[in-house]
Image (cartoon, rainbow, N blue to C red):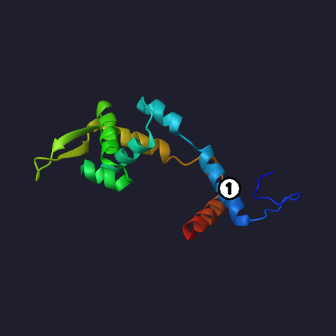
């Protein structure tokens, strides 16, 4: 019995808390990090994933990367170094400031983003099994949230 249910009954004590717990449980069950690590050949930690997905929109400086994700400068450098070691990003001269570098995706980086999208955005089997009306109701509820 979950903490969100009343003692001795099947009705949730707090329906909102129960719904939230069910959503978390569903999303957690859809974890695809192992599949992604196998496809890419290495684990894509949260920092590396965030930066990789940020760079799909174009090159950024290390400062922009740090600011976008709340990283400090040394951690941003560490993340970029790891991505560079895997051949996913490269540092380029900044066109307007020779003291700075831009970090950009390589061809391998673009391929890694496409692979990650294919894996992470794939519709879970459980949702595919719902009938159209149920999916539309669920989508409508989530839009309201």
Q: Residue at x 36, y 49 (%)?
A: 71
Q: Residue at x 41, y 39 (%)?
A: 115
In this picture, residue 3 sits left or right of residue 62 = right
In this picture, residue 69 sits left or right of residue 24 = left
Closest to the observer, 34 or 8: 8
The kind of secondary structure element at disc 1 is helix
Q: Is residue 141 visible?
A: yes
From this view, report whether residue 118 is shown above or below residue 18. Answer: above
Q: Residue at x 42, y 29 (%)?
A: 41
Q: Quadrant of the C terminus?
A: bottom right
Closest to the observer, 7 or 51: 7
Query: Where residue 86 appears, x then y in whole percent?
Result: 33, 31
Q: Residue at x 64, y 48 (%)?
A: 126
Residue pointed to by mark 1: 21
Query: Where residue 129 appears, x then y in whole percent?
Result: 65, 50
Q: Which quadrant holds residue 144? A: bottom right
From this view, report whether residue 33 is shown above or below residue 7. Answer: above
Q: How many marks?
A: 1
Label 1 crowd (10 A; few <14 / some 14-19 / many >=20): some
């Amino acid at each position: 019995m979950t903490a969100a249910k009343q003692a001795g009954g099947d009705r949730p004590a707090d329906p909102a808390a129960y719904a939230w717990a069910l959503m978390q449980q569903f999303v957690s069950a859809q974890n695809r990090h192992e599949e992604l690590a196998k496809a890419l050949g290495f684990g894509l930690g949260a920092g590396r994933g965030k930066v990789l997905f940020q760079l799909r929109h174009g090159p950024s400086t290390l400062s922009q990367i740090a600011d976008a994700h709340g990283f400090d400068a040394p951690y941003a450098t560490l993340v970029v170094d790891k991505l560079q070691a895997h051949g996913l990003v490269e540092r380029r001269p900044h066109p307007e400031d020779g003291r700075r570098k831009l970090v950009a995706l390589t061809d391998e980086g673009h391929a890694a983003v496409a692979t990650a999208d294919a894996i992470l955005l794939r519709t879970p089997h459980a949702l595919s099994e719902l009938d159209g009306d149920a999916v539309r109701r669920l989508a409508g509820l989530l839009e309201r949230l």
